Image (spheres, helix red, strand yellow):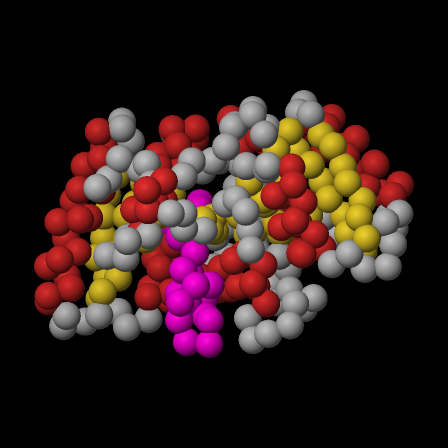
């Protein structure tokens, strides 16, 4: 599954600092994918709330980016509306800025962030930090032995070619689980070879840990990573998987991709 080009990038906005950061950090990606930017505001009680501010923000975004920019004002829950509108528009990507304290309160359940991501019809980038990341020098790709893991290799190669990025593979395995480590290493080498043959610099790091999400987030924070690309896995205790935890914890932007049917996988890794 690759990121669709010549489509749209949907950005839900609430005029907070984080949503403005999300807009600005989308400019280059919109240019690379030949996509128009769509700013979407939603209010539970009104489809005209902040109409003037939205029009002004769209005009500013167009002037700053030099890109085609549209806007939508809807009545409804912003996160439910985002997934629905992205599917309706055939958007190639959703980019959302999330304040550190936000837990997607409009959803019910133990992990509302997970519900929003699980229903996304396209890859979704979540941004919690206000750091300027217009460049993307290093992309981190966590790899494990799950059948879904390979599906993110195609988008990673696509992004790395856009930004001339290096790719860093990280694999986390339980300490003293020699069997799992031995099974993982050949696959890591295969992925690494494929990425290098695509003309992209690539390194790998194995980390023994019982806390996969924390290990990935710590590695990203300590190794100048600009983007984590992961598959969204819906399994886990109370519906909270490692991929959901990474989104919750990471100050580095995270791209989450929902798995597709096995016959649709075209990463080049088999």
Q: Nearer the viewer, residue 14 or 135?
A: 14
Evaluate whether residue 197 shows in this view: yes
Residue 4 is left or right of residue 146, and the answer is right
**Which residue is at 46% across, 71% downward?**
239
Q: Position of residue 204 (x, y in %)?
A: 23, 48
**Which residue is at 63% across, 43% downward?**
86
Q: Quadrant of the C terminus?
A: top left
Asked where in the image residue 168 lies, by quadrant, the reply is top left
Q: Position of residue 221 (x, y in %)?
A: 41, 56
Evaluate whether residue 218 shows in this view: no
Q: Position of residue 132 (x, y in %)?
A: 56, 43
Magenta stretch bounds? 223-245
- What count of labels does the image hold? 0
Residue 183 is left or right of residue 145, and the answer is left
**Which residue is at 77% across, 52% downward?**
42
Q: Nearer the viewer, residue 122 or 95?
A: 122
99 over 108 or under it: above or below: above
Q: Position of residue 123 (x, y in %)?
A: 50, 45
> Does 163 lie within the magenta span?
no
Residue 238 is left or right of residue 15, and the answer is left
Q: Quadrant of the N terminus?
A: top left
1 over 110 or under it: above or below: above
> Does 242 lie within the magenta span?
yes
**Which residue is at 56% across, 75% downward?**
110
């Amino acid at each position: 599954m690759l990121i669709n080009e010549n489509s749209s990038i949907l950005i839900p906005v609430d005029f907070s600092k984080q949503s403005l950061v999300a807009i600005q950090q989308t400019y280059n990606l919109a240019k690379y994918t030949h996509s128009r930017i769509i700013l979407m505001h939603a209010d539970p009680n009104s489809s005209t709330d902040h109409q003037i501010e939205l029009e002004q923000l769209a005009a500013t975004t167009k002037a700053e980016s030099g890109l085609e920019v549209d806007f939508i004002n809807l009545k409804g829950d912003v996160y439910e509306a985002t997934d629905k509108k992205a599917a309706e528009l055939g958007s190639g990507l959703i980019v959302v800025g999330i304040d550190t304290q936000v837990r997607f309160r409009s959803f019910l359940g133990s992990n509302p962030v997970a519900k929003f991501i699980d229903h996304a019809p396209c890859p979704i980038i979540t941004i919690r930090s206000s750091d300027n990341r217009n460049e993307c020098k290093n992309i981190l790709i966590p790899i494990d032995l799950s059948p879904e893991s390979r599906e993110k290799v195609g988008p990673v190669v696509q992004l790395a070619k856009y930004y001339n990025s290096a790719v860093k593979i990280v694999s986390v395995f339980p300490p003293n689980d020699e069997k799992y480590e031995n099974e993982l290493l050949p696959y890591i080498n295969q992925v690494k070879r494929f990425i290098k043959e695509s003309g992209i610099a690539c390194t790998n790091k194995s980390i023994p840990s019982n806390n996969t999400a924390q290990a990935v987030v710590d590695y990203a924070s300590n190794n100048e990573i600009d983007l984590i690309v992961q598959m969204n896995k819906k399994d886990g205790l109370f519906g909270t998987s490692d991929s959901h935890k990474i989104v919750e914890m990471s100050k580095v932007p995270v791209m989450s991709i929902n798995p597709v049917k096995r016959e649709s996988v075209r990463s080049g890794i088999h």
